[in-house]
Amino acid sequence: MTDGPATESTLTELVDELRAAGVAVSVGEHLDAARALASVPLADREVVRATLQCSLIKRAEHLDAFNLLFELHFAGTRSSSQAQPLAGLADSELADALRVAIGARDGELLRLLAEEYVRRFAGLEPGAPVAGVFAMIAASQAANLDAIRGELLAAASQPGAGESADAGGTGSGEGAGGAEAAGDGAGGGTGGGWRSGAGVIQERLDRADVDRTIDAFRGELQAAIRRTLVADRGARAVTKTMRVRLAEDVNITNASAAEQEAMLAAIGPLAHRLTKILAQQAAYRKRRLSVRRTIHLAMGTGGVPFRLATEPAPPPRPDIVVLADVSGSVAAFSRFTLNLLIALDSRLSRLRAFSFVDGLSEITELVSEARAAGRQLGPAEAARGAIRLNGSSDYGYVMREFASEYSRQFSKRTVVLVVGDARTNYTDPAVGALAEVSERVGKLYWLNPEPRRYWNQGDSVISRYAPVCAQVRECSTLRQIADFVRSLAS
Amino acid sequence: MADSPIDDMRERLRGAGYLADAATGTVVHLATALGKPVLIEGPAGTGKTQLAKSVAIMTGKPLIRLQCYEGLDESKAIYEWDYRRQLLQLQLLQGSSADASLTAAGIFGEEFLLSRPLLAAIRSDQPVVLLVDEVDRLDTEAEALLLEVLSEYQVSVPELGTVTARHVPQVFLTSNNTRDLSEALKRRCLYLHLGYPSVELEAEIVRLHVPELSVHLAEEIASLVAVLRGADLKKPPSISETVDWARTLLALGAAELTGEVTRQTLSVLLKYERDIGAGLAELSLA
C-alpha cells in the first residue's frame, strides 16, 4: 500500500463503503483525505488511519464504523499467508506462551499468538462461507482466556510473589512503609486494615491490568480473523457480511449494551436541539431596549438616536409535558426516553414528566433528582407509581386520568409529547379524553417507538389517536427522532 | 522512523509539555501542512484546550483565545466601534466648522475600532494560534459568523472595507458536543476526537509533569485512575486531576498506593460526594 494509485483506489472504496453505511462524506472531504495522505508517511498504518479519520469522519458516533471499515480496507501487509514463527509449537506450548505473554503484557507476542490461534482453531477454510462470529467463538474458546485470567489473578494475590521483584527500585520507600505498618500493627486494630487496604488496591490494579491485556488480546484475535477473511474474500465481500451499522440507525428497542451507550452519548445534542425548537413554538417575550446598540445606530445620524434598537429576544420558556409509556412492551425504549427526559430537564426550567402503564404517575421530581445526582433512571423505578392493577397497559384509563386531573393546568404555551406504542390490550382507548387535552394545549405530538409496519396490528390503535395529534411519528431509531426534531423546526 | 514528520511533531509537542499519541501528532502535522482548522471533541479534561496552548508554545506564536458562551455576538467576537470615543470626537468636531462628510470619516477610523479576538487574529502582524474554546456553546447565528471568518480568513467592516488576514492563523476549535455543530463548519475542519489516554500514556504524562515520581508509582496512579473512569461517575477524573493527585502523593511521600492514602486523597480526583462513594466502592475500599 505504499504506491500512490493503489492507496487512492482503496480510499475511494473506503469512502463508498462509508457512504453506504450512512456516513455523509462530502466530495471536499474525500479530496481533503487524498491531499492529506500525500503529506504523511504511508508506511505507518496508525498514521494513515489517523489521517483518513480526521479528514473523513466528523462525528464521534461514526468512529467505530470507520475503524472497522478501515481495518477491512487497509488490512496492512501482514496476512496469514506470511511466515508463521509459532507454527512449530505444540498446542500446549502455545497455551503456555499465551499465559506468559498476557502475564508480561507483551503486545508483539500477543499479536503473533493471535495470528496462530486464528490459523489453528478458528476453522476459517479458504472459500468456505464461515461468519466471523463463529471463528471468534472458536478461537477464544481454544485460548481459554477465563482460565488464564483466573490463574494470573490467583498468582498475583499470593503475598510477595511478583511484587517485591519489580518494586526493587524503590527499596528505601518500601522499607519505610514496612516500618510504619509494623508500628501501626503494634498500636492496635488499625494496622491490619492498613495492610489489607494496600493489598486490596494492588489486587484491584492487577485485576484491571490483566483484564486490559486480555481485552487487547481479544481485539487482536478479532483483527486476525478479519485479516484472514479479507485475504480470502476481499474487503468488499467481508464488509457486506459485517453489516456496519451506525448508532443512529440502530433500532433503539433491540440495541446491544454497547449500542445503547453510543446512543446515550447522542442524547445531549438532541435534547439541545429539541429544547431550542420547542422554545420557538411558544410565544416570544418582550424585548428590552439596548442602549449600546441604539447609540451605535445613532453614530450614523450624528449622535441623534433616530432609531431604537432592542436586545435580542430572550428565549421564550415553553411548558413541555412528556407522557411516557414505561410498560414492559416498550421497556428498552423507555430507558432511552427517561435519559432524554433527564437531558431535557437540565435545559428546561418547566418540564413536567409523567409515566404510565395502567396508572398515571408524575415523575417530574424523580427526573430532576436523578439529574442532580448525575445518575440514570431505570424503567422499573419510573414505573413504580404507574402500575395500578396488573401492569399491562391501559391507555383508556391513563388518557381519562390525564385529561381530568392535569389538562386544566395546561395552556396554549404547553407542548405535549406522548411516547408510547398505543397497545391498549384491547381496552377502550378513550380517544375523546386525549382530544380534550389536545384542544387545550399548543401542540400535541405522538412518538411511537414501534416500526410503522406493526402499527394498527393486534391491539395497536395508533390510527385512532392520530386525528387528535398534530403529528404521529415513528421513532425507533435516533435518526428518526432527529428527523422529527428537524421537522418541527421547518 | 526518526525522520518521519509525525514523530518530529510529537517530539516538538513533547518539548512544549504535551505528550501526543500518534493520532494527535498526525492531526497537528496535517493542520500545519494543509493550513486547516482543527475541531477537537471529547469529554472534559482530556487536554483539548491544552493542545492548542502547547502548539502556541511549540511554534512561539501568540495565542488568541475566544471563549464562547450562549449569547456571544459579533460585537464580542469580531469587532465593535468604541462609541464613547466616537461621541467625544463628535462633540469636539461640533465646535469646529467641519462639514458632514468629514465628520463621518472622522469617527469611523481605525483608532475607534475595538478588535475582538477574531479580528485581532486576522489583523495580527505575526502568525498566531487562534483558540475558539467550547464552540458548541455558541448560538447558531454566531456559529455562522465564525464560519464566515474561518472560510475566507477575512472580515468586512462596512465602514472600513474588508480586512484580509496577512497570515492565516492556525485555528483550534474545541467542543464538548453539547449540541451538533453545523455540517458546513465540520466539513471545513480536521476532526480530532480526544478520549482519555491509555494507561501507559497517562503514566508518561504524569512523569513528564512530576518527574520526581517513581516510574512504578506513576504506573499505579494511571492504572487506578483508569479503573475509576470505568466506574459510574458524574464527573470522571481529568488528566490534570491525575497530575494533581500525583503531586499530592509526592508531597505526602507515598511510595506506593495503599488503601489508607488513597482514601485520604481521593477527593483530589473526585469532586462530588456521590462520586467519592462510588469510587471507593469500585476500589473495594468502602
Image (spheres, coloured by chain):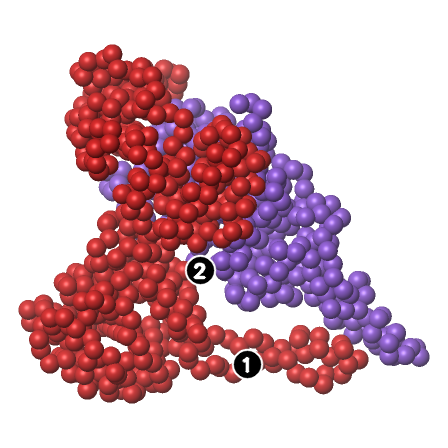
Chain colours: A red, B purple
- Residue at image coords 24%, 36%: A132
Residue occupied by mark 2: B179
| Spot occupied by residue A238 in the image (x, y as percentages of width and height) | 30, 39
- In the rendered image, the vertical position of residue B114 relative to residue B210, given as above or below: below
- Residue ID for mark 1: A287
- Mark 1–mark 2 Cα distance, whole angstroms, equals 26 Å
Quarter of the image containing the C terminus of chain A?
Answer: bottom left
Chain under label 2? Answer: B
Relative side of A40 to A375, left or right: right
**Picture coordinates of residue B194, whole percent (x, y):** 45, 43
Of residue A177 and residue A367, the one placed in the foreground of this image is A367
Answer whether residue A272 is visible to the viewer in this image.
yes
Q: Indicate the quadrant where residue B258 lies.
A: top left
> With respect to residue A15, does A158 lie above or below?
above
Q: Position of residue A408 (x, y in %)?
A: 27, 87
Which one is in front, A437 or A183? A437
